[in-house]
């Protein structure tokens, strides 16, 4: 498998892909070794993972370079990602005792009732490329902490990073038979679905997630899906500092070139603020530097996948055919690398692809609305349910709107944000189950209720 730098189109590495036989050998190795790993104390496992975290911190420059070379995000954003992952790991390690040790629910004369959190066994993590550290640690850290063995399949667009992660985990002391990387694309993922893992944890698109969910259903094991979104954001008329809101929300839409599962993907602005908001938003977007992701000060690097350029151009074409106005951008940049101009569309309607299908790129549709009711109706109009955001000076107003939206996260005066302490979960086409928070820590365990008389 060739690894291509998406910003230069150079081949930077060639890797050998796994096949059914190599995957089966890895799986059997893990199956055999997992009980001994689960038999270690939680403290011992946490200590190894803490060393892994220290290695992330000390080797950040090299790791960031590798990440940028294969996904095209600006170097500073790669560093931010690794620092973010490290903070998450600290939260998980700090809360492991609280959420993974036995819970005594009843303790009275003659009766004790206890919940024990047993590991699932050997779990399979099929992952995405857009934040390989962040979405990776959401799964493999709590999985390993709670005593599971893991097969981690990085995306074919983030394989070098997957191998770096494996190297550092082993360097930190994770036994070879407890964590294995599966290299390859769709075929490798499909082969993993044929095997008998004790749980499947997937991050990626709705299309693949649905396929995986159906495929593993008959195995009767947990299958968790973290999928895409079409996340809406509403700017009400009482926002105190519209220019500031425009700057923050532009970042929410365009950070990582819009390739975040929780990127702002649709913006609805109250008519009273519309002109001011738009002016500040366009000016912010036009102030950003695009170019090679290794150049200092670049905010927009290349996209990761070449195919996405066509998806974005189709969204622009469809929107313009249906009456939208193009304020800036609208096409791929000529020359080497998968670059797309930052694109803003107005006069959009919810029947346009750009307002319905996940864009996953530097493109945004902005619509004028007359009141909260219209904004809510527009925001609700989606098959996805990852996040939603409301900017207003009144918390109760924001909460009223957010409570009527079927999404896993709700934001008041912020957007494109993930917290280790809160469940990260999608609804409808955005997924099933949760990572992060106590729910995400326990997602890799099977609770057993002990009824103890005596
Ligand atoms: P993708 O669905 O194309 O691929 C994801 C993974 O699935 C890759 O490792 C791929 O090799 C594997 N795969 C592809 N086909 C498969 C098959 N038939 N069987 C088994 N495995 C298969 O997604 P992507 O392009 O890597 O990631 C982008 C998507 O991920 C976006 O939709 C984004 O919103 C979503 N995402 C969601 C979250 C979240 O937390 N909700 C986080 C990051 C990304």
Image (spheres, rainbow, N blue to C red):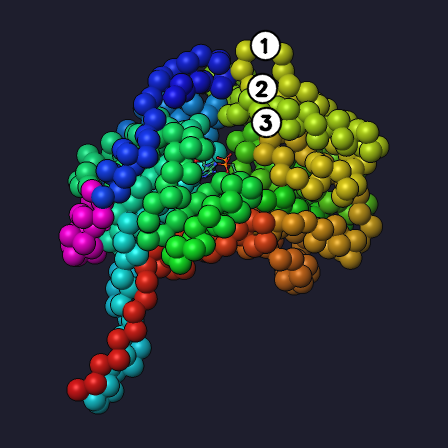
On screen, residue 164 above or below 213? above
Q: Which residue is mark 3?
A: 308
Magenta span: chief secondary structure: helix
The quadrant of the picture occupied by the N terminus is top left
On screen, residue 357 above or below 290? below
Q: Position of residue 195 (x, y in %)?
A: 34, 45
Q: 401 or 153, which lies in front? A: 153
Residue 40 is inside the magenta segment: yes
Q: Position of residue 63 (x, y in %)?
A: 33, 27
Q: Is residue 83 visible?
A: no
Residue extent of the magenta highlight: 29-49
Q: Which residue is mark 2?
A: 339
Q: Nearer the viewer, mark 3 or mark 1?
A: 3
Cα distance in 3D space between marks 3 and 2: 10 Å
The tag earlier along the polypeptide, 3 or 2, is 3
The reply to whether callout 3 and callout 1 are in contact (CB within 8 Å) is: no
Asked which secondary structure carries label 2, the reply is loop
Q: Position of residue 116 (x, y in %)?
A: 27, 68
Q: Is residue 348 visible?
A: yes
Q: 176 or 87, which lies in front? A: 176
The tag earlier along the polypeptide, 3 or 1, is 3
Residue 335, disc: 1
Cα distance in 3D space between marks 2 and 1: 9 Å
Q: Give the side of residue 150 with respect to residue 400, left or right.
A: left
Going 77% across and 32% down the picture, which residue do you hit?
319
Asked which secondary structure carries label 3, the reply is helix
């Amino acid at each position: 498998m060739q690894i291509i730098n998406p910003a230069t189109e150079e081949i930077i590495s060639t890797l050998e892909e796994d096949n059914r036989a190599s995957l089966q050998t890895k799986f059997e190795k893990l199956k055999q070794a997992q009980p001994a790993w689960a038999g270690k104390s939680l403290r011992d496992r946490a200590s190894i993972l803490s060393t892994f975290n220290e290695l992330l911190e000390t080797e950040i420059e090299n790791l960031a370079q590798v990440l940028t070379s294969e996904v095209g995000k600006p170097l500073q954003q790669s560093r931010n990602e690794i620092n973010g992952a490290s903070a998450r790991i600290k939260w998980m390690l700090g809360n492991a005792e609280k959420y993974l040790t036995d819970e005594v629910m009843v303790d009275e004369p003659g009766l004790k009732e206890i919940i024990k959190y047993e590991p699932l066994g050997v779990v399979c993590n099929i992952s995405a490329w857009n934040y390989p550290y962040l979405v990776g640690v959401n799964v493999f850290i709590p999985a390993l902490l709670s005593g599971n063995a893991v097969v981690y399949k990085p995306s074919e667009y983030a394989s070098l990073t997957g191998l770096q992660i494996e190297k550092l985990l082993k360097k930190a002391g994770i036994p070879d038979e407890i964590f294995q990387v599966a290299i390859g694309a769709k075929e490798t993922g499909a082969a993993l679905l044929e095997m008998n893992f004790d749980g499947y944890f997937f991050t990626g698109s709705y299309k693949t997630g649905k396929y995986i969910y159906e495929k593993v259903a008959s195995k009767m094991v947990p299958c968790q899906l973290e999928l895409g979104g079409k996340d809406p954001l509403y700017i009400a008329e009482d926002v105190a500092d519209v220019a500031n809101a425009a700057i923050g929300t532009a970042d929410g839409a365009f950070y990582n070139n819009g390739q975040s599962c929780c990127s702002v993907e649709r913006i609805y602005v109250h008519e009273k603020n519309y002109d001011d908001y738009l002016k500040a938003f366009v000016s912010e977007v036009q102030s950003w530097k695009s170019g090679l992701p290794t150049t200092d000060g670049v905010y927009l690097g290349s996209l990761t996948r070449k195919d996405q350029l066509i998806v974005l151009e189709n969204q622009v074409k469809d929107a313009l055919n249906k009456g939208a106005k193009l304020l800036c951008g609208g096409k791929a940049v000529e020359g080497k690398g998968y670059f797309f101009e930052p694109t803003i569309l107005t006069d959009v309607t919810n029947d346009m692809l750009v307002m319905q299908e996940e864009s996953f790129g530097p493109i945004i549709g902005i619509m004028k609305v007359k009141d909260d009711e219209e904004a809510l109706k527009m925001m609700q109009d989606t098959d996805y349910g990852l996040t939603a955001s409301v900017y207003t000076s009144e918390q109760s107003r924001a909460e009223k709107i957010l409570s009527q939206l079927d999404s896993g996260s709700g934001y008041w005066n912020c957007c494109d944000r993930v917290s280790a302490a809160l469940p990260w979960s999608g609804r409808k086409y955005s997924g099933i189950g949760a990572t992060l928070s106590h729910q995400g820590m326990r997602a890799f365990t099977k609770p057993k209720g002990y009824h103890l008389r005596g």
